[in-house]
Image (tube, rainbow, N blue to C red):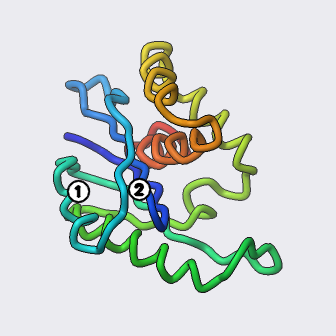
Amino acid sequence: MRVGGIDPGVHTVWWAYFEKIDDRGFLFTKAGSFEHVSFWSTRARVQMLRLDLVAVEMPQVYAGKAKGDNNDLIDLALVAGACAAGVEDALVPTPRKWKGTMKKDAHNAKTLRALSRGEDALLQTILAGYAKGLHHNIIDAVGLAAWRCGRIR
């Protein structure tokens, strides 16, 4: 069984997944990104990940804390929908639902603490291929997958 997490962006989709290892639980296995081109191509790319379960972050409006144009959230919601359409068993939680009210840095640290040494080493190798300013996207995808398979609450 493969359980994924997807942090959609208007231009880039960030993903990660864990795989079921016998009765011992789930093991973080892979993460990456792909360019969002269209609803159908994004749905097909997600299908190619062969996920059994997925959590796709749904954009959320925060009253009084808008960064940029709120209309961009419409585009982002369409990307999230394309991602969710690629997996039969998809949850689409808002950040508040899966992270609670925890600040991004604190929640990223919580996600990293949920990984074993080997999983963290794999993640660090993956992150090395991306600019530091983009790391939070992959860590969010890992966090969503960990939340979906019950590794973090």
Q: Residue furthest right?
A: 64
* Residue type indicated by callout 2: Val
Sequence-earlier tag: 1 or 2: 2
The residue drawn where x is 66% and y is 43% is 107
* Residue type indicated by callout 1: Arg
* Residue in the foreground of this view, choosing between 99 and 104: 104
Q: Contact (CB < 8 A) between labels 1 and 2?
A: yes
The numbered mark at residue 45 is 1
Badge 1 local density, few (<14 within 10 Å), some, or many (20+)? some
Name the secondary structure under disc 1: helix
Left/right of residue 122 with respect to residue 112 in the rendered view: left
Residue receiving disc 2:
13
The vertical placement of 24 against 130, above or below, is: above
The residue drawn where x is 41% and y is 61% is 56
Q: How many marks?
A: 2
Name the secondary structure under disc 2: strand
Quadrant of the rendering where the N terminus is positioned? top left
The numbered mark at residue 78 is none
The residue drawn where x is 22% and y is 72% is 40
* Residue 41 image point, x, y percent: 23, 66
* Residue in the foreground of this view, choosing between 37 and 124: 37
How far apart are the alpha carbons under marks 1 and 2? 10 Å
* Residue 88 image point, x, y percent: 20, 64
The residue drawn where x is 25% and y is 56% is 46
